Amino acid sequence: MLTLKVLRDNPEKVIERLAVKNFDAREIVEKVISLDDRRKALQTESDSLLSEQKKAAAAIGMLMKQGKKEEAEAAKKEVASLKARSTELLAQAEENNKELESQLVLLPNMPCELVPLGKSAADNLVVKEGGPEPDLPENALPHWELAKKYDIIDFDLGVKITGAGFPVYKGKGAKLQRALINYFLDRNTAAGYKEVEPPVVVNAASGFGTGQLPDKEAQMYYVGLDDFYLVPTAEVPVTNIFRDVILPEDAFPQKLTAYTPCFRREAGSYGKDVRGLNRLHQFDKVEIVRVEKPENSYAALDEMIAHVESLVKELGLKYHILRLCGGDMSFTSAITYDFELYSAAQGRWLEISSVSNFESYQANRLHLRYKDENGKTQLCHTLNGSSLALPRVVAALLEDNQKDGYIEIPEVLRPYTGFDRID
């Protein structure tokens, strides 16, 4: 959530920057400032009334001592009137503050100056390419056909048990999943990220803290009886570890990693681009999360991008890195870099990671702060990235490593899988 200070100090800059996200913020910004003006006015009047109440209450005691009962009674009536007005002001202030909060959460995060202009994914900027060109046999198969051929992923069985988008991994397919999770976690912990195992259901406060609520209810699975949500990403529970926390100045960086199953409804998804593992309702993902002092967050972002790239390189897959344009960014992000793998059998790019800096936007919602060297309380910066999301990694691994009669397992995964091929 943007801070009132940012909005009040330079409202035109906020409007200008949010236009990069193709978001017209003028009406909301003006309303927020108006509501904040009213908040201040109500507070000023309330403070004045409180001062008057104190004076009147003190006067009652003096008048009683002096035997001036009639004047004391009049003073009591005045105090009662002041209290009634104070109660009225309190109710008005509460209503005003609720409206102010409801308007603030409608504003997305401002994109940083590096974010390119654009309206859709077609306008994203390729900043780096790497990895070998896949050497495929003739008549190469897409991963859903490879999965059936080698009996490693059963999409039909998942439909029977649950529905579309909930595959069943079998045999070497299940072992490959487990191998990737362990490999990613080991590489993350070796890079200094502390492993945590968080819950995979969260309350509404957690969803609000990281910006999933009230923006993405339609994409989240809701457990109505308990008012819980299934996590769409480990970012939500892991970042909420720091909700309502004030960190000491020397506590940085905070670096955490976690594996969780993730759940997304993907409402309205259909067509060839969602076949097989391309888009699922339940999938495995390993996440990295960082909390940083503001002056260090962009250096941390660069470190995270380099770390995710190292994972992709070690898997030996063709990839590129995109800097997302304003129109393709999330509501909460200040800047995002996407990693995509090339699926040669499908002839398309598959997103496998987003690495984002949220600056202070999430921290303001989370009340996540730190004490600076002068003892002053400041908002932290939060960052997160997939390292990595498994389904499309598996899709690219299967397709790009298919040979005549088998699928080759990348060398770095063999100590984890216990086999070097799927046949």
Image: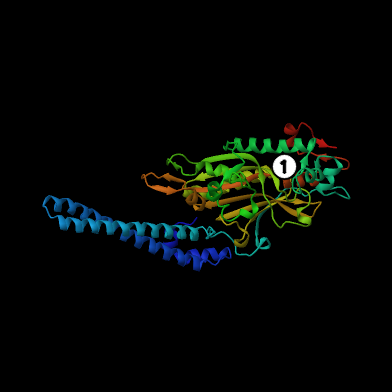
Camera-nearest residue between 164 and 295: 164
Q: Quadrant of the C terminus?
A: top right
The amino acid on which the numbered mark 1 sits, given as a three-letter code, is Leu
Camera-nearest residue between 63 and 30: 63
Residue 60 position within the rendered picture, expressed as x and y whole percent measured from the top left: 18, 53
Q: In the shown orientation, is residue 212 left or right of residue 249? A: right
Q: In the picture, residue 201 is in which quadrant?
A: top right
**Colour convention of the picture:** rainbow
Residue 202 position within the rendered picture, expressed as x and y whole percent measured from the top left: 58, 44
For the image, the number of numbered tags is 1
Q: In the shown orientation, is residue 17 left or right of residue 141? A: left
Q: In the picture, residue 234 is in which quadrant?
A: top right
Secondary structure at badge 1 equals: helix
Camera-nearest residue between 391 and 63: 63
Local crowd at mark 1 within 10 Å, few (<14), some, or many (≥20)? Answer: some
Q: In the picture, residue 330 is in which quadrant?
A: bottom right
Residue 360 position within the rendered picture, expressed as x and y whole percent measured from the top left: 49, 52
Residue 228 position within the rendered picture, expressed as x and y whole percent measured from the top left: 59, 45
Q: Looking at the image, can residue 402 be seen?
A: no
Q: Looking at the image, can residue 114 be seen?
A: yes
**Identity of the residue furthest to the left in this view:** 66
Badge 1 is on which residue? 315
- Measuring 30% from the left and 56% from the top, which residue is drawn there? 83
Camera-nearest residue between 176 and 253: 176
- Measuring 73% from the left and 54% from the top, which residue is drawn there? 349
